[in-house]
Image: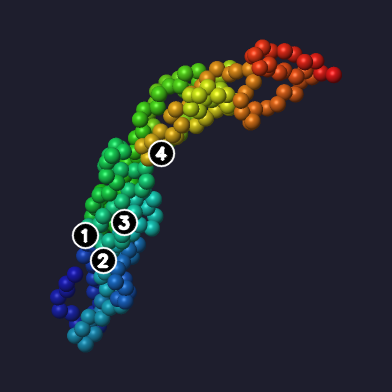
């Protein structure tokens, strides 16, 4: 700001221009928490002040959606959206970077919080014989817990090998739908996994090589 002639000892209020704040003269930049104004005093035909107007900065200290270098008001900066986010789009093939301007309020325009969008995964389809009975949209970070219906168990690779598990999780990760091949298959008598519980009843149920079942009495 400018001021006309003043008498010795007179004090005036100085307002910093847009994009600047009043801070100690030794500092090279300011923040939006600093005051916009300061006091200057006329002494022996010179203005004496303890502060100076310095440009505000846009910092990345509390931003988790993107990374960017510190910039001063009015300058442009390259912004990189975090993993699983894209600039102005939810398409996995879209760019994750964009250019923004540091504003007088210490925020970027466009804002990374709104411009960086979650990547969409292919639509999650229903899984037969499970709790997931309808298709649903998925974006980065979303996950769905699927439970097989009674009499069915998880088949992780379509091999038909028994797993004895009845629950699994599908998760969208940076445009990729994890565990999308998992299905619910009919349970079989006797599991082929070491994780299956052992028989604890008084009789032992065994499967003969021919596939026939026999009941051996406990002695």
Mark 2, secondary structure of its residue: strand
| Image disc number at residue 68 | 3
The image shows residue 33 at horizontal and vertical percentages of 35, 62
Instruction: Work out how far the residue at label 3 is from the one at label 4, CA to CA, in angstroms.
Output: 23 Å
The image shows residue 57 at horizontal and vertical percentages of 29, 62
According to the picture, the residue beneath numbered tag 2 turns out to be: 55
Which sits in the foreground, 114 or 172? 172
Q: Is residue 192 left or right of residue 91?
A: right
Disc with the residue nearer the chain's start (1 vs 2): 2
* Residue drawn at x 50%, y 28% as measured from the top left: 156
Mark 3 touches mark 2? (CB < 8 Å): no
* Residue drawn at x 46%, y 31% as measured from the top left: 179
Mark 3, secondary structure of its residue: loop
- Which colouring convention does the figure follow? rainbow
User: Taking 217 as reference, is 195 above or below it?
Assistant: below
Mark 1 touches mark 3? (CB < 8 Å): no
Mark 1 touches mark 2? (CB < 8 Å): yes
Instruction: Work out how far the residue at label 3 is from the one at label 2, CA to CA, in angstroms.
Output: 18 Å
């Amino acid at each position: 700001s400018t001021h006309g002639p003043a008498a010795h000892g007179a004090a005036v209020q100085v307002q910093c221009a847009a994009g600047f704040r009043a801070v100690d003269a030794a500092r090279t930049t300011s923040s939006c928490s600093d005051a916009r104004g300061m006091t200057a005093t006329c002494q022996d035909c010179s203005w004496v002040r303890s502060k100076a107007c310095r440009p505000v900065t846009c910092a990345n200290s509390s931003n988790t959606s993107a990374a960017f270098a510190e910039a001063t008001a009015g300058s442009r900066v390259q912004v990189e959206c975090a993993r699983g986010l894209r600039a102005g789009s939810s398409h996995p093939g879209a760019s994750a970077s964009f250019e923004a301007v540091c504003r007088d309020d210490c925020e970027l325009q466009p804002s990374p919080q709104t411009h960086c969008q979650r990547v969409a995964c292919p639509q999650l389809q229903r899984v037969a014989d499970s709790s997931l009975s309808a298709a649903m949209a998925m974006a980065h970070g979303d996950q769905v817990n699927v439970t097989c219906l009674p009499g069915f168990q998880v088949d992780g690779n379509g091999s038909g090998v028994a797993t004895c598990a009845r629950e699994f999780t599908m998760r969208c990760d940076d445009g990729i739908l994890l565990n999308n091949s998992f299905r619910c298959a009919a349970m079989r008598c006797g599991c082929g996994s070491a994780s299956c519980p052992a028989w604890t009843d008084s009789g032992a149920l065994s499967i003969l090589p021919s596939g026939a079942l026999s009941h051996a009495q406990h002695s």
